[in-house]
Image (cartoon, rainbow, N blue to C red):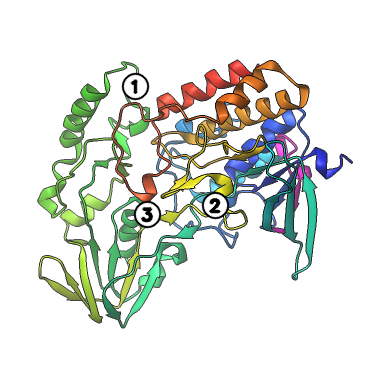
Amino acid sequence: MTPTHEQIALIGAGPSGLSAARALSKHGVAFQGLEMHTDVGGLWNIGNSRSTVYESAHLISSKHMTEFKEFPMPEGTADYPSHRELLDYFQDYATHFDLKRHFRFGVRVVRVEPLSQTADSLWRVTIDAGKGVLETAEYKGVVIANGILAEPNMPQWPGQFSGQLMHTSAYKKAEQFKGQRVLIVGAGNSGCDIAVDAVHHAQSVDISVRRGYYFVPKYVFGKPADSVGGKIKLPRWLKQKVDTTLLQWFTGDPTRFGFPKPDYKMYESHPIVNSLILHHIGHGDVKVRPDIARMDGHTVHFKDGSQADYDLVMAATGYKLHYPFIDDSLLNWQGMAPQLYLNIFAPRFERLAVLGMVEAAGLGWEGRAEQAEVVARYFKGLDQGAAQAAAFNQARQGPSPDLSGGYHYLKLERMSCYVNKEVYRRTMRETAATLG
């Protein structure tokens, strides 16, 4: 057994954690995986207490644009797999690369702290091994891969609501809506998915929105939308203009259904990938409402002066970045998110990395695997005293390169770690090649 002070502590066994385990093991970097649940899969394991998926959850990107390149999804997998298919996929991935043996399951990380303020500090990791029994060990470094879609971002509204108030993180089955007058707050991808679920069980369904959205159908010309086009690379401004025009051909103008006109350009926020929400709005199954002004009993008052009564208000308002076991300052937290080099590396410490703290339309798990490859090569290079790793170590302490691709992303908490897919993946591949 390798002593823990010669290992990396890897936190999480979801897609990013498995990517890290694969890369570290491939490059011979010793590590110990720590996972709170009893199995792999993270978010996509609905039995995991931290999972926020629901029974009807499917990918919003197609399988071939999402899968790991070295481990394609099996023949017969749906174009947009369900969480059940995805859990099987991650379990098969872990088995194929013999990753589970590296993990301790059923342990919760309580605290992560450096033993010193030096760049090469060892790290003290405290875990709850079950029933409150705490264990502490010292590690060479830490890779945090516990996911970014688990801590609810729950807004507060003026007034008091007498019905049921909940976040989408607590939603599991459409039967929860049976006979209820439902208001969904937020028209992101989860909000639209859940509104579509609700129409089959609820007495009524409304959806409250603050801003406009771009709606992308899941299929274009009979193929998954994200697999169509892309062969011709257009300048950013022209791509935004062309794709906005094409989108209007397929979905029409959402403002005619009551949505505000977007005050941003295409791709400056995550698009809504849903073929059914506009269908149900057009059929009168869902009514679009403006932003909430206040609540009073069962009555919700909206900012346009209208009001309606509801039994259940569900906040589809997204999630917060949440690393409760480590001090924010160690991750260089500024404003809404940690400021990390390449969205991965903390500037003060050589072996402190975060995987999965990145979002981009179509980044897929291959994008996470490319992140993990950079981390593994860098750590291996540090162990070997490689000149490339030393040079990267200097770069890591400076400002991160521009990963936006020239897009002006909305200044929202949910967009705080957003990047351009092409720029980010190219940067990952180039960085990995530089590290040797």
Along the viewing direction, whichever of 163 and 286 lies nearer the viewer: 163
Q: Which mark is in front, 3 or 2? A: 2
Residue drawn at point x = 33 percent, y = 48 percent: 412
Residue drawn at point x = 62 percent, y = 26 percent: 393
Dot 1: within a 10 Å radius of its alpha carbon, few (fewer than 14), some, or many (20 or more) residues? few
Q: Secondary structure at mark 1?
A: loop
Marks 1 and 2, the one that precedes in the sequence: 1
Along the viewing direction, whichever of 361 and 81 lies nearer the viewer: 361
Residue 429 x, y percent position in the rendering: 54, 21
Along the viewing direction, whichever of 200 and 1 lies nearer the viewer: 1
Residue interval drawn in magenta: 95-108
Q: Give the residue at mark 2.
A: 328
Position above or below: 341 against 171 = above
Viewed as shown, does residue 232 lie left or right of 150?
left
Q: Is residue 224 visible?
A: no
Extreme right residue here? Answer: 1
Q: Which mark is in front, 1 or 2? A: 2
Gap in angstroms between the C-alphas marked 1 and 2? 39 Å
Disc 1 residue type (three-letter) = Gly
Gap in angstroms between the C-alphas marked 1 and 3? 26 Å
Marks 3 and 2, the one that precedes in the sequence: 3
Residue 190's disc number: 3
Disc 2 residue type (three-letter) = Asp
Position above or below: 152 against 273 = below
Marks 1 and 3, the one that precedes in the sequence: 3
Q: Give the residue at mark 1.
A: 230
